[in-house]
Image: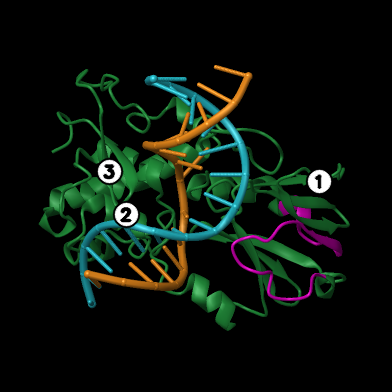
Chain colours: A green, B cyan, C orange
Amino acid sequence: MPELPEVEVTRRSFAEAIAGARILAVRLGKPLRWPLGCPAESLVGLNVVGVRRRGKYLLIDLDRGLLLVHLGMSGSLRFSGSQPEPGKHDHWDLQTSAGTLRLHDPRRFGAVVYAQGEEAPVAKKLLDGLGMEPLGPSFSPLAFHQGVKASRLPVKQLLLAGKLVVGVGNIYASEALYLAGIRPTVRASSLGPVRIQRLYQAIGQVLGKAIELGGSSLKDFSSADGSSGHFQNAVQVYGRAGLPCYVCSTPVKMIRQGQRSSFYCPSCQR
DNA sequence: ATGTAAACCTGTGCGC
DNA sequence: TGCGCACAGGTTTACA
């Protein structure tokens, strides 16, 4: 489900409401990708300072330590004043004085991890090595250019790897490459400066638009306030195998790259 | 170091 | 209606 836009939309939908709240209780469901890393009861009494995002991670800052939340493939958060009986796939509740934050994650590829600080080993292991924030000031054209030229990977896989730039997942990688007119299979290092510049701009453009539209709700994604996104209606190639390209009517192609599907227009993308 | 595949887990949609 | 298979928004780990 969640790439950068969905995570950011989720963050915005509850960050202000939860800031300043006191943790009253923590409920754990079935195990997630990683263990919480501390006794659940030890969080009780701590206060939420704010919520940040790094790549696809949400960082919930507490007055002592922080929680790193990843939504994996099928996770979504809900922040609500009422706390109905947890469903089969609700695997984590953070009950606070301002409401309950609940993680719903059928596949349980997601995780909630407590770290004493960003320099703690658990946090470093997850956050170190992440690439530039595509919507932040560190996302410079020069650094992006250098990173692309240095990689022998097919450009789609370079984007997905998250070591050059974070937050671009399978949907937005295909979409950005379509916007830039670049085939997903092209070796990154073979791209020239003009095409790299186009890709640089396409990434920011696609992610920015997706956030504006509230993310993509392909299956059942909704943000923490329950609203769903609309980017799925603005998608150009993702999931459109065999359907005509909106620009040239050539059927969109689907291929496999590193066990993930890629979609592109064989005519518009070279 | 690099590149590929398998692993984690559950649900859904499709062909037969 | 049931069965088996392919596939799904992510990331780490294991192995060539």
The dot on residue A256 is 3
User: What kind of residue is marked 2?
Assistant: Leu
Where residue A234 appears, as percent x and y from the top left, is 42, 27
Q: Which type of secondary structure does the marked residue at label 2 adopt? A: helix
Mark 3 to mark 1: distance in Å? 37 Å
Image position of C10 (left or right of A49) = left
Q: Is residue A239 magenta?
A: no
**Mark 1 vs mark 2: which is more N-terminal?**
1
The residue lying toward the viewer, choosing from A37 and A21, is A37
Mark 1 on the same chain as mark 2: yes
**Mark 3 vs mark 2: which is more N-terminal?**
2
Q: Which type of secondary structure does the marked residue at label 1 adopt? A: loop
Span highlighted in magenta in the image? A16-40
Q: In the rendered image, which residue does mark 2 sit on?
A: A159
User: What kind of residue is marked 3?
Assistant: Arg
Where residue A64 appears, as percent x and y from the top left, is 75, 77
- Residue B10 against residue A242 in the figure, above or below: below
Image position of A125 (left or right of A99) = left
- Residue A176 against residue A244 in the figure, above or below: below
The local crowd at label 2, few if under 14, some if 14 to 19, many if 20 or more residues have their Cα within 10 Å, is many
Count of numbered badges drawn on the protein:
3
Q: In the rendered image, which residue does mark 1 sit on?
A: A86
Where residue A262 appears, as percent x and y from the top left, is 30, 40
The dot on residue A173 is none
